[in-house]
């Protein structure tokens, strides 16, 4: 697929024009998804559904909440004062916490600990999501069309499942995946 194909798919799932953001996401997806095995229409449909849900239809690449709820969360690596807000959810899959910023930043070659705002840059947002997707074996669940399993691995539960299912239906329709 070309960057324009990916941009069109993002726009179809979002249900609205994405303009320059769509182009940037499309370029990032063309670069980062194939090396991480997101290479079939069904895998891409699931990737788009989950990332569109996590970003409100690609409206925000930074969590809307302040992040103070993550303050002092040692399980996220938030050990210094201000880490909760500094390392709140960013990117297509909303990576959260100092430890995840360090891990995914190292994986994509971007210093996200000293520059956490870069996690919300479209190219980095796609790159970290692709690494997460691959590292959590989500292609296998996508191949099985297992939206519940994918949602649990991303969210830890089934929060937002109706919206994720609606996004998946849009993605499948756009990509020609039969329900």
Image (tube, grey):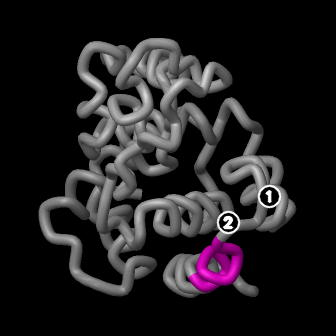
Q: CA distance from mark 1 to mark 2?
A: 7 Å
Q: Secondary structure at mark 1?
A: helix
1 and 2 marks in contact (CB < 8 Å): yes
Classed neighbour count for the residue bearing mark 2: other residues with Cα under 10 Å, few (<14), some (14–19), many (≥20): many
| Picture residue at 41% right of the left edge, 39% below the top | 88
Q: Who is closer to the viewer here, 82 or 59? A: 82
Q: Secondary structure at mark 2?
A: helix
How far across and down, in percent of the image, does residue 101 sit?
45, 23
Classed neighbour count for the residue bearing mark 1: other residues with Cα under 10 Å, few (<14), some (14–19), many (≥20): few
How far across and down, in percent of the image, does residue 67 sit?
41, 43
The mark found on residue 42 in the picture is: 2
Q: Who is closer to the viewer here, 155 or 70? A: 70
Residue to which mark 1 is pinned: 143
Count the labels in the image.
Answer: 2
The mark found on residue 108 in the picture is: none
Looking at marks 1 and 2 on the same chain, the residue that comes earlier in the sequence is marked by 2
Q: Who is closer to the viewer here, 166 or 66? A: 66
Please name the predominant secondary structure of the magenta segment in the image: helix
Q: Is residue 6 highlighted in magenta?
A: no
Q: Who is closer to the viewer here, 145 or 58? A: 58
| Picture residue at 81% right of the left edge, 54% below the top | 141
| Picture residue at 59% right of the left edge, 68% below the top | 45
Image quadrant where one finds the C terminus: bottom right
Indicate the quadrant where residue 133 lies.
Answer: top right
The residue positioned farthest toward the left in the image shown: 20
How far across and down, in percent of the image, does residue 94 sit?
48, 46
* Image side of residue 171 versus residue 65, left or right: right
| Picture residue at 64% right of the left edge, 64% below the top | 46
The span picked out in magenta is 160-166
Image quadrant where one finds the N terminus: bottom left
Q: Is residue 55 above or below residue 103?
A: below
How far across and down, in percent of the image, does residue 42 sit?
67, 66
């Amino acid at each position: 697929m070309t960057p324009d194909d990916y941009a069109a798919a993002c726009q179809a799932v979002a249900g609205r024009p994405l303009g320059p953001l769509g182009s940037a996401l499309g370029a990032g997806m063309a670069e980062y998804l194939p090396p991480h095995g997101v290479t079939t229409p069904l895998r891409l449909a699931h990737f788009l559904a989950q990332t569109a849900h996590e970003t409100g239809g690609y409206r925000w690449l930074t969590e809307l909440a302040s992040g103070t709820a993550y303050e002092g969360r040692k399980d996220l690596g938030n050990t210094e004062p201000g880490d909760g807000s500094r390392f709140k959810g960013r990117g297509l899959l909303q990576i959260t916490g100092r430890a995840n910023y360090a891990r995914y930043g190292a994986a994509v070659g971007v210093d996200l600990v000293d520059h956490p705002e870069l996690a919300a840059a479209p190219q980095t947002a796609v790159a970290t999501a692709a690494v997460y997707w691959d590292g959590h074996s989500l292609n296998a669940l996508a191949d099985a069309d297992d939206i519940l399993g994918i949602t649990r691995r991303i969210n830890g539960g089934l929060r937002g499942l109706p919206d994720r299912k609606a996004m998946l239906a849009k993605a499948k329709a756009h990509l020609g995946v039969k329900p």
